[in-house]
Image: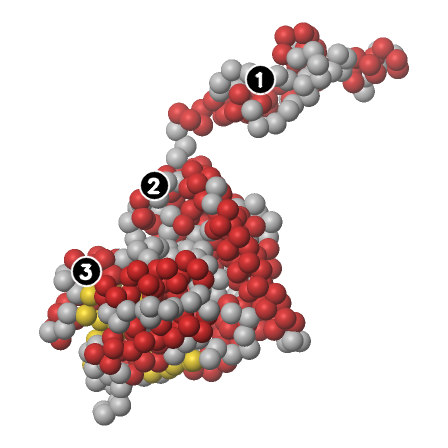
């Protein structure tokens, strides 16, 4: 990921722009409320949901604590099954590996399964620069790609689009890159899905190379798992001759048995379903069945930096369900683009600054893109305490960027400590404050002050100092003993 993903401004400025889009807010409110209610219903069916959540968190925490061991075990299992493992330190190295693998096949196009990791490293752009076309096959990702747009949600990348907008995109763009949309296309969901199916069919049947991500990677067997709702992933994973999977190192689970926990947690938390319509698993190469060349690119790209932070590492437990986005009052009003990252919402606000660092204005602002209401923690299926992480990262931002800007505040805090440390100094300060009433306000509130003090008074009304302090009143009415 680049330091300025998509060239976005910092969250406060980007959020202000998005808040002005009433259609966006309507689309988001409708979509997130629907997913929230579906999730609540299916989660409520399980008496052991709390225990499943604890189990998921424990498995992921154990894996992260022993990640080196499980990564080596995974590589051994993949290799034994006929696959090849590649290690990528960063986005540039991962992109170079994938481009070289595609070039080695002689092909100039690939079909893609929806993958957050490939979006993170901007693989599509790298392939395009190398003269290779990458076709997104997930319906929402197809909408984003055809609309020359960017994803705004982890699970539903085109959540900011309504049906009328999607119809217009299909009619204008499909014919430029493949089978065109029907001339009489309507905005009925079934008709839109049919148009996408017809458009993608020729690409599925023609493509010799596919690129995927993975929801889980099993160290014990070297297996990868993709869960999806449309069947496009199954087509990409079975039809091409070469399959390249880009997988973050945090996606590991130790044993095949562990999937039993996550395949209950993930669908309920993401789409509000008891089970995903399509759950695809594959292990290595099987002669005469599916891809005959299989590669796994294990991606670091800042993950070991996050792992080194004893508090921050819990963000790596994330299984990309997007439940935190669907309950977040900030995300619901601003959408995903305001976060300036492929990972939006509460999880993006804690994951992105750890992967990219906090050197840019975009990343420094992300830990503050939250009300700290705690709803994200309540719904997280692996119990990531996002509010605590936000506070932790805010502290880091302050410490890393402490400089001349912090000196005025440090001076004020030192002065306050000195005043409050002695009752006589406090009494004198209170007396001065009462006398200042004649200068800064006589109508009950402090009026508009010049910069930089106006940063406070422009946003709130502060009461003017009282004419008489409590200390003075006490001495006048109770005698000279003010203790």
Mark with earlier residue (2, 1): 2
Q: Considering depth in this image, is 227 or 380 the residue closer to the camera?
A: 227
Q: In this figure, which residue is indicated by the disc labeled 1?
A: 448
Label pair 1/3, CB-CB below 8 angstroms: no
User: Could you classify mark 1 by the number of other residues whose Cα lies within 10 Å: few (under 14), some (14-19), or many (20 or more)?
Assistant: some
Q: Quadrant of residue 69?
A: bottom left
Q: Considering depth in this image, is 67 or 271 the residue closer to the camera?
A: 271
Q: Is residue 276 left or right of residue 233?
A: right
Q: In this figure, which residue is indicated by the disc labeled 2?
A: 360
User: Could you classify mark 3 by the number of other residues whose Cα lies within 10 Å: few (under 14), some (14-19), or many (20 or more)?
Assistant: some
Mark with earlier residue (1, 3): 3
Mark with earlier residue (3, 2): 3
Check the image and report above or below for 474 versus 350: above
The secondary structure type at the circle numbered 1 is loop
Q: Residue at x 35, y 60 (%)?
A: 169
Q: Residue at x 29, y 78 (%)?
A: 201
Label pair 3/2, CB-CB below 8 angstroms: no
Residue farthest front in this picture: 184
Q: In this figure, which residue is indicated by the disc labeled 3?
A: 128
Q: CA distance from mark 2 to mark 1?
A: 33 Å
Q: Residue at x 56, y 24 (%)?
A: 458
Percent x, y for residue 224?
35, 77
Which color scheme did the rendering employ for the protein? secondary structure
Does residue 350 appear in the picture of this structure?
no
Q: Is residue 313 left or right of residue 413?
A: left
Check the image and report above or below for 138 versus 452: below
Q: CA distance from mark 1 to mark 3?
A: 54 Å
Q: Considering depth in this image, is 118 or 190 the residue closer to the camera?
A: 190
Percent x, y for residue 478?
88, 15
């Amino acid at each position: 990921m680049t330091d300025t993903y998509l060239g976005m401004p910092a969250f406060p400025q980007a959020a202000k722009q998005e808040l002005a889009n009433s259609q966006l807010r309507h689309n988001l409110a409708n979509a997130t409320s629907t997913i929230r209610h579906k999730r609540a219903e299916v989660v409520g069916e399980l008496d052991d949901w709390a225990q499943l959540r604890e189990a998921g968190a424990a498995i992921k925490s154990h894996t992260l604590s022993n990640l080196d061991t499980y990564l080596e075990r995974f590589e051994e299992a993949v290799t034994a099954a006929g696959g090849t493992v590649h290690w990528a330190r960063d986005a540039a190295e991962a992109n170079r590996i994938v481009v070289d693998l595609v070039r080695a096949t002689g092909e100039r196009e690939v079909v893609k399964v929806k993958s957050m990791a490939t979006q993170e490293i901007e693989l599509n752009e790298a392939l395009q620069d190398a003269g290779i076309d990458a076709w997104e096959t997930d319906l929402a990702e197809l909408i984003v790609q055809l609309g020359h747009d960017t994803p705004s949600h982890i699970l539903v990348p085109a959540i900011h689009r309504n049906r009328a907008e999607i119809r217009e995109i299909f009619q204008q763009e499909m014919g430029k890159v493949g089978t065109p949309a029907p001339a009489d296309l309507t905005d009925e969901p079934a008709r839109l899905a049919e148009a996408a199916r017809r458009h993608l069919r020729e690409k599925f049947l023609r493509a010799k190379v596919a690129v995927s991500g993975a929801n889980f990677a099993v160290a014990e067997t070297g297996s990868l798992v993709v869960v999806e709702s449309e069947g496009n992933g199954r087509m990409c994973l079975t039809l091409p001759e070469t399959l390249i999977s880009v997988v973050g190192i945090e996606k590991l689970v130790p044993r095949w048995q562990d999937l039993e926990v996550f395949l209950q947690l993930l669908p309920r938390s993401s789409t509000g379903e008891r089970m995903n319509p399509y759950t695809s698993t594959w292990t290595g190469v099987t002669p005469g069945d599916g891809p005959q060349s299989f590669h796994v690119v294990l991606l670091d790209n800042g993950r070991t930096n996050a792992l080194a932070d004893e508090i921050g590492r819990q963000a790596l437990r994330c299984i990309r369900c997007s439940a935190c986005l669907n309950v977040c009052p900030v995300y619901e009003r601003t959408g995903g683009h305001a976060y300036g990252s492929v990972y939006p919402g509460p999880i993006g606000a804690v994951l992105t600054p750890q992967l990219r660092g906090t050197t840019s204005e975009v990343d420094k602002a992300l830990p503050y893109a939250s009300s700290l209401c705690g709803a994200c923690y309540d719904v997280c299926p692996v119990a990531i305490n996002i509010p605590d992480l936000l506070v932790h990262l805010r502290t880091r931002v302050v410490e890393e960027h402490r400089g001349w800007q912090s000196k005025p505040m440090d001076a004020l805090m030192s002065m306050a400590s000195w005043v409050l440390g002695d009752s006589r100094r406090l009494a004198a300060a209170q007396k001065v404050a009462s006398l200042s009433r004649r200068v800064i306000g006589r109508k009950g509130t402090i009026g508009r002050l010049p910069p930089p003090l106006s940063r406070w008074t422009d946003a709130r009304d502060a009461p003017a100092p009282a004419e008489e302090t409590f200390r003075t009143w006490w001495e006048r009415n109770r005698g000279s003993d003010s203790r």
